[in-house]
Each structure stands twice: as structure tokens, then as C-alpha cells.
Image: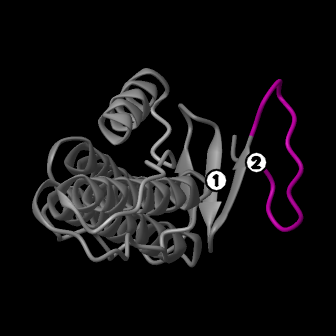
Amino acid sequence: IRPLGEMQTVLSEVERTGDYSRKVDYQSSDELGQTAAAFNNMMSTLQSALSNTNAVMNAVAHGDFSTRVKIDAHGDLNRLKESVNSSVDKLEFALQDVMRIAQAMANGDLSQKITQEYPVVFGQAKNGVNSTVDALNKMKQPGQGVLWNADLGARISLGHLVVFGGGQAWMATEPKPD
């Protein structure tokens, strides 16, 4: 009865605290010992999966998309692993697309657009970026390569954006248009 009581106590503690590092301290070759060993292995697997997943999500929260969940998992834990890794992949790809377009615009190249299909918020970001490129192309003055938007008071030329505010602006090469 001691091993079952200990196992019940540990299970209750895990349920109450969420601490998957808890183990049953019972070793025997009988059925109770085998049950305790299986319980301890399950707890170790859960703890490893949660720890690894938390590490990946913490890296993502800090802008590092190079880490993936790398555990040997089965069933629900494997589905969790695959979902987390797929989510990080999609987030990384979408951000790379946005960064690619932003860099192209900074270099004065308004021919680039995001062509990859993305769902929901990523799709909205794609549409917003592509609409921005379209709007900038519409503002382009023929033959000058300089964009002026009088409503915004902004100048975009070779990746430089100067915003005029309060009637003042600092520009090294060109005056503000009238």
C-alpha cells in the first residue's frame, strides 16, 4: 500500500502544482515497481516536452526563430511538437517576406511584393505591405525617382524618409517642395 499511497500523493501534487519533475521513489520488479517506473518515465517525458517547448517559445518571444522543439515524442506530445514547430516556421517565413520587402523599399526598389499566401493576420500583413508598395508606386513622379506625398509631408528617395513637421525639415540635398 505504501507505493500506491506515494503514487497517489505525487499525482495529487502534480495536479495541484503542475510540477512534472515529481517522481515516485519506489523501485521493485513487481507490478507496483513497474507501474512506478512507467509513471516516472511518463513524468520525465512530459517535463522534457514542456521544458523544450517553453525554451522554443521563449526564443521566439525574443526574436530568435532558429530553435525548434527537438524531442522524441508520440501521440499528443508529438502533435504539440509539430504544431509549435510549424507555427515558428510560418512566423519566420512571414517575417522574412516582410523584411525582404522593407529592405527592397529602403533600397528604392518598389517592384517587390509578397507573393506567398498566408492565413489570417499574416495574410493581412501581406496585403498591407503590398498595398503600401502599390501606393508608393502611384505617388512616383515620372522620371524623377523621387516620391513626394504632400498630404503626409514625406519624401522617399533611395530609401530615405524625411517627415516634415511643424513647418520644419532637415534635408541635406534637396529643399522641401512648395
Count of numbered labels shown in the rendering: 2
- CB under 8 Å between discs 2 and 1: yes
Q: Is the magenta stretch mostly helix, strand or loop?
A: loop
The residue that mark 1 highlights is 155
- How far apart marks 2 and 1 lie (CA) works out to 8 Å
Where's residue 169, x and y in %?
85, 42
Q: Which region is colored magenta? A: 164-176
Where's residue 155, x and y in %?
64, 53
Nearer the observer, 176 or 1: 1
Where's residue 114, x and y in %?
26, 68
Neighbourhood count class around disc 2 (C-alpha, 10 Å): few under 14, some 14–19, many 20 upward: some
Comparing labels 2 and 1, the label whose residue is closer to the camera: 1
Say which quadrant the C terminus sits in. Answer: top right
Q: What SS does tag 2 mark?
A: loop
Q: What residue type is labelled 1?
A: Arg
The residue that mark 2 highlights is 176
